[in-house]
Image (cartoon, rainbow, N blue to C red):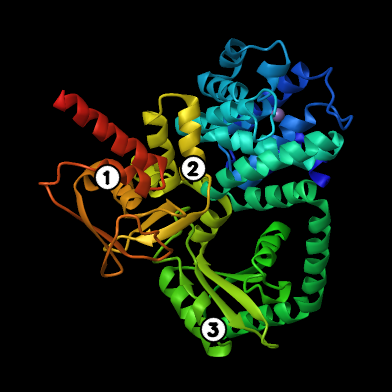
Amino acid sequence: MALSTVTIDDLIASISVYHNDDDDLEFIRKAYQYASFLHKDQKRKSGEPYIVHPLSVAYILTTFARADMNTVCAALLHDTIEDTHCTSEDITLNFGEEVAMLVLGVTKIKGVVFSSREEGSLENQGKILNGMVSDIRIVLIKLADRLHNMRTLEYKTADRQKAIAQETLDFYVPIAYYLGSYQIKNELEDLCFKYVDPEKFIMIRNDLEEYIDNTKDEAFQIISKIKVILEENNIACRLTYRTKNIYGVYKRVREGLKVSEIHDLWAIQVIVKDIPTCYQVLGIIHGIYPPFNQMLKDLIARPKTTMYRSLHTSVFGNNGRLIQFQIRTEEMDDISLLGLPYYWDSPDVGMDEELHNKFQFFKSLVEANQHANSTKEFMEEAKNDIFTNMIYVFTPMGEVVELPEGSTPIDYAYKIHSDVGNKMEMAIVNASVASFDRRLKNNDIVKIITNDSIVGPREEYLGMCRTNLAKRKISEFLRKQEKEVK
Ligand code: MN
């Protein structure tokens, strides 16, 4: 892969795009020289000098996450404490406390990679999630580290390849998804797929390539046509496109679709100056290509819980083949590429509490971390409530609530607030009274009626909910009540 030949000059050039400060760039060169010196006698399994690895990790972070200077330095130094005589004090002395804290954070969650079903792996993953709660940059470095290791996985034994790929798919891919780091997620998925199920990987890849080959002329024609029409309407825009990643196609095929039936296999991105223009462009496109109504999504008015925003519409192209348009502003496009890291260098937004709450994944993770009595308990809650298939339901005011599949009104109530769960009298789902153990579905509108005279949840509720969160809160309440009675 071309990226393994990345040099320090490539790295500097990549940062300069978004952060051009001579002193900071010099600081990064210093970190590179320091890391090169420390790793000078080590080699990667590929035979390359070891420094290629931290350099690549730093480079991934600049291109996929626009990482700040301290994160880039920490990425360059991320294996020094573990693999060389360097200590965190050395790093503090040379590069300051923040860099040292990041390197130490990454070092703590290192160690042997276990298969995702082994106990040791759970422990390690718990540390990663802890790191996530304390400083999201630690996890970003860990993700980039894993991505580079996946890119160079061919040098490991077949057994290790499968175990590492499976763990990556089960654990790192969901993290990348929740962070909104789609570029990292998509590449990781394809790399994992290749090792986890090589036969299916090759089959889907070939089908996809063939389909792209057969349809690209048509797609490019549509792009040029839209470009001309938008210009005629005096709409300044930037047009790009992507095709779905191999694993993404596989997931649809697994659901029973043919490659040619996937509505967003080709996605054309139309990037315009502001939100009203997005809707204007949508109108223009629908005037030319008839929309496939079920696939119209207004993710501007209603962003995904990963903060992704865009208008999505799949339309019938020239030969009746479906093609997706994604219409958004430059800012939304940045968010779509970078995810959460976008907010690092966005001074007007900042990583404040409100933002944490918007990323419901974080909120759940922080909560689970605060209340769990052990790493094991924390990881069990994380695996059961967060690292699983999710559904999205609405509050009566139209807010989206993210819940694991199989959740009931009890889970919903506790996700909103303990008091709502404890004082729950009645559940209304889509305007009808619903039993407390009803399994919620995507797009249900859920309303909980509370009553102050309710003493608290009943013991049988424990068997009527799905999330560890609700179970934990109900048990807490019952224990407290028991004490009071005594
Ligand atoms: Mn590493």
Counting residues from the start of the chain, the first of labels 3 and 2 encountered is: 3
Q: Is residue 118 left or right of residue 397?
A: right
Question: Dot 3 corresponds to which residue?
Answer: 291
Q: Nearer the viewer, residue 70 or 468?
A: 468
Q: Nearer the viewer, residue 348 or 81?
A: 81
Q: Position of residue 342 (x, y in %)?
A: 51, 48
Q: What secondary structure is found at the residue carrying circle 3?
A: loop
Q: Is residue 187 above or below residue 105?
A: below
C-alpha distance separating marks 1 and 2: 19 Å
Counting residues from the start of the chain, the first of labels 1 and 2 encountered is: 2
Q: Residue at x 70, y 24 (%)?
A: 112
Q: Residue at x 58, y 74 (%)?
A: 325
Q: Position of residue 144 (x, y in %)?
A: 66, 38
Q: Which mark is residue 417?
A: 1
The residue type indicated by label 1 comes to His
Circles 1 and 2: CB distance less than 8 Å?
no
